[in-house]
Amino acid sequence: MRTLIEAALDRSRTTLLLLAALLLAGLAAWQVIPKEANPDVAIPIIYVSLSLEGVSPEDGERLLVRPMEQELRSIEGVRKMTSQASEGRAAVTLEFDAGFDPEQALTDVREKVDIARAELPQEADEPRVMEVNVGLFPVLSIGLSGPLEETQRLAVARRLKEEIEGIAEVLEVDIGGDREELLEIVVDPLVLDTYGVDFGTLFNLVNRNNRLVAAGSLDTGAGRLALKVPGVIERLEDVMAMPVKVDGDRVVTFGDVAWIRPTFKDPEGFARIDGQPALVMEISKRAGANVIATIEQVERLLDDAGGVIPEALEITTIMDQSEMVEEMLDELLNNVLTAVVMVLVVVLAAMGLRSALMVGLTIPGAFLSGILMIWTLGYTLNVVVLFALILVAGMLVDGAIVVSELADRHLRQGQPPREAWVNAAARMSWPVIASTATTLAVFMPLLFWPGVVGEFMKYLPATVILCLLASLAMALVFLPTLGGVFGVSASRRETGQNQNRVSVGGQLYRALLARLLSMPGLTLLFALLLMMLITTAYARFNHGVEFFPAVEPDSAQVLVRTRGDFSAEEKDAVVRRVEARLSGMSEVEALYARSFAMPNQQLGSDVIGVLQFQLIDWQRRRPVAAIFSEMRERTAGLPGVILEFREQEMGPGEGKPIVLEVSGHDDAATDRAVERLRELMDGLGGFRDIEDNRSLPGVEWRVMVDREAAARFGADVAAVGSAVQLITTGLQVASYRPAGVSDEVDIRVRLPAGYRSLDQLGRLTLNTARGQVPISHFAELVPAPKVGTLHRIDGRRAVTLEADVAEGYRSDERLRALLEAGGTPPEGVMVEVAGEQEDQQEASRFLGSAFLIAIAMMTLILVTQFNSFYQAGLVLTAIVFSTAGVLMGLLVNAQPFGIVMVGMGIIALAGIVVNNNIVLIDTYNQLRGEGLSPGEAALEAGGLRLRPVLLTAVTTVLGLTPMVLGVNVNLFAPSLGLGAPSTQWWTQLSSAIAGGLTFATALTLLLTPCMLVLGGRFEKRAR
């Protein structure tokens, strides 16, 4: 190592040029690296969408879901398969094992879907295979609202969609509330009866007259002429001239018997922004695009498009990720700078201006080198990477402090600058490398964290590893070069009588350590008792367990639930009543309301609408809990309506904390098991917003056809079905593509609105061989229990039961109590824990395994460094003791034990606390080699390493202090913020590391020398 250090100093200009190049390249990388809020996580889910208009849930399960499941279940790597069948549509969702290959999985699914397509009904639409990708989620949602006609809003939205999709960084624009266009042919039922229209003949006539026939070409010898027979419907006039009935030489057209109007399909719901009818444009960016730059371009385009947008149309920003990203980047960047400044102040106070500047230069050097490597790897700059930079801020200077402190001592002893820095870097090279290697060893296993949480968190260990490697080069190559070139010799006064001067604090420490070294056994016993006391106190006064930290959100939702067979307008009226109660709140920037005609299965089968609130900046409003409390008071007393208040989900966790999947072969037994679990939840208490996805009670009407009786009249089920469609969604006879429309438009025959009723269904007639016959002759209208949506998990019918936890309760404790009270489920019924608790168990198992692997790797490094099992074990015991400090930090800062954050904090702490022990024991071994006794060597090693140990610990703790306290310091404004959302993410992790390191540092300085003396005594007895 000395050779490398001397070579760097011999070619100092080259070394300094390389340092300057790294700094400039790092600055350039900081400017161009894509910036986003959350990491671009590949979710291991592929979704297959199936549709067949009008199909019932039971038939959808039998005809669509089961054939598809049969093929998809054989795909390798599928962890879980869930299916839903509802009216007119079905879906199969495949969840793959962690670490799956998205492209291969997508290819496998498409192959199996193509095979299963042959088993599906011919009338079914083509199955669609979609990959769930967080990176493709919208980054900007814009509402277009105002008192305008729907056609005007749609025209503006489609024009803007085309222009915005022309921006290179924009992937797509989806218009929420964009209803499909429809060409509706309205026919009076008396006219159909008079002309005796036969539906089969009608469909064939329209279909055969709506096609383009490529008739080939004619070669006359004098030229080649292309021929075609154009017959595709292009205009309304083409539809009017379409034949409906042919009798001899008489032809009846649509123009004779019907009136035609361009319109839209029946609404699936309604949308409003601040009470005005609205459309919402959801804009997604391309993978790797900078979210801030992308949204700036979209906003410029909207500003320039003022001439296209009517004055009455108001544009509202519902969701803008760039604001959140910029805010979080600013807050975290301020915290990084604050950490750097605090570290520099500490080093300046301890070692002087010149040393502080040189040590301080290693922080931006390592930072920028790390960002350069992150950008090179294709990572983005997100909240996890930024926190990793804060976490590593204090650790980056550890090696530099150790080297510069020894060089400073050499300078005071009279060595010239070059010799002092070379000797210091060479002497401390292996201890610094070993301590960095142990830190890398604990972060390395975290790179292989499986699942969505692992994909989310992997940026932290990757960033820490890259920055620590850069800091190693800074401490052992660039810092000695800077010291050798720009360092100055100590004054003669310093090199003389004051070179061994010890501060008052150092003298007190030496006196205390000397007392403790005289009774090492009692010191160890006291440390063990203190550890037990802290553990007992935590067990008594802890603040619970949670999976992922709760963060103050920027938006919130209210789900509107009610039951009954309501029309789309009736459901919207209920949502309007809730909306009216909640409008006018000063802390709500925008209120976006949507109602659903059909149940939204992702939200719940009884959810008829959603109210989404975009809140004002967190600094100017109350916490969301207080806002929700006011909303509950405002909406109290609404009859027949249940409201569920939801905060915006942050991080990898989603959904309610308690999720149980109840499945079985007997639906009645499954229902009874779900009812019993719900009763237990109500009885135990601590649960709120309990819901399950069983079908809601309701009535559906079935047209039961007597096939034998129908056959006597020459009718069949298909003819009856066509007649029934006239009073529902309409009988589709063709489709066409008019000018200015990108998608095909259906042409449907319907009865006038006044005839669309159950009474008219009984009066419908069919044209048969015996003339016009009422369908009531061979069909009967029968009421039956309504089936909303059927759910299946891994090929079995299943019910999912979900619940939130009431304030003051813990999800893990409530789930345990529920399962204990429920006992063994009935025979044939299975109850499985899913959702957050399942993820929590997986994360706990992985973190436990990662911790053991890290300990094994550190043991190997330590035994290699010290060639002693006792000293390696001594360093590892510091990790055990530091866990007491973690619990103390959580208690003092009133934080719950976060499975992800605190678990990762303990692992990260394991790599940090061993560093000072390594340097201390290395000094002890050197002094022992010089002939000192164990007691003398331990006392001297403690005195020599006091300053660097305190400096490295204090710099790391101070670097984390803003996060621990939830303080956001803006050095440029200047201003001070408390409780910023970005700090709430990391308070648990920061508290764990800061508390553990503070406790472990005290043990390093006091307990480790005592343990070395004990080891020396055992060694003496062994001889």
Image (spheres, rainbow, N blue to C red):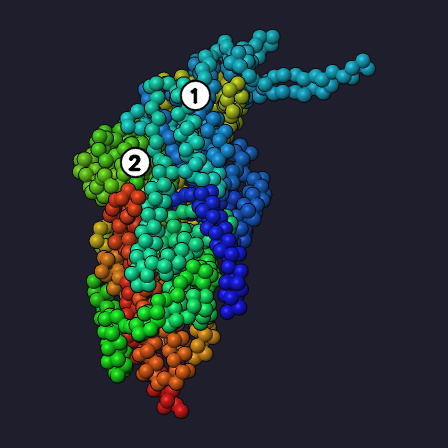
Packing grade of label 2 (10 A; few <14, some 14-19, many >=20) is many
Q: Nearer the viewer, residue 595 or 206?
A: 595
Residue 103 appears at what percent x and percent y?
A: 55, 47
The label shown at residue 614 is 2
> Residue at 23% of width from left, 39% of height from top?
620
Do the residues bearing badges 2 and 1 touch, measured as CB atoms within 8 Å? no
Residue 419 visible to an observer of this rendering: yes
Residue extending farthest to the front is 492
| Circle nearer the viewer, 2 or 1 | 2
Residue at figure coordinates x 78%, y 15% from the top left:
223
Residue 173 drawn above or below residue 389: above
Residue 958 in the image: state x and y as whole percent: 30, 58
Above/below status of 883 relative to 777: below
The extreme right residue here reads 221
For label 1, the SS is helix
Where residue 1004 appears, x then y in whole percent? 32, 72
Q: Is residue 896 toward the left or the right of residue 861 in the image?
A: left
Residue drawn 24% across and 41% down?
A: 619
Please provide percent x and percent y for residue 836. Answer: 35, 53
Q: Amino acid at mark 1?
A: Ala
Q: Is 723 placed left or right of 269 in the picture?
A: right
Q: Quadrant of the rendered structure where residue 500 is?
A: bottom left
Q: Identify the residue position indicated by label 1 in the image.
A: 155
Relative height, residue 606 to residue 391 (above, below): above
Query: Where 655 falls versus 60 (above or below)?
Result: below
**Secondary structure state at the residue bearing disc 2:** strand
Q: Residue 1023 occupies which quadrant of the picture?
A: bottom left
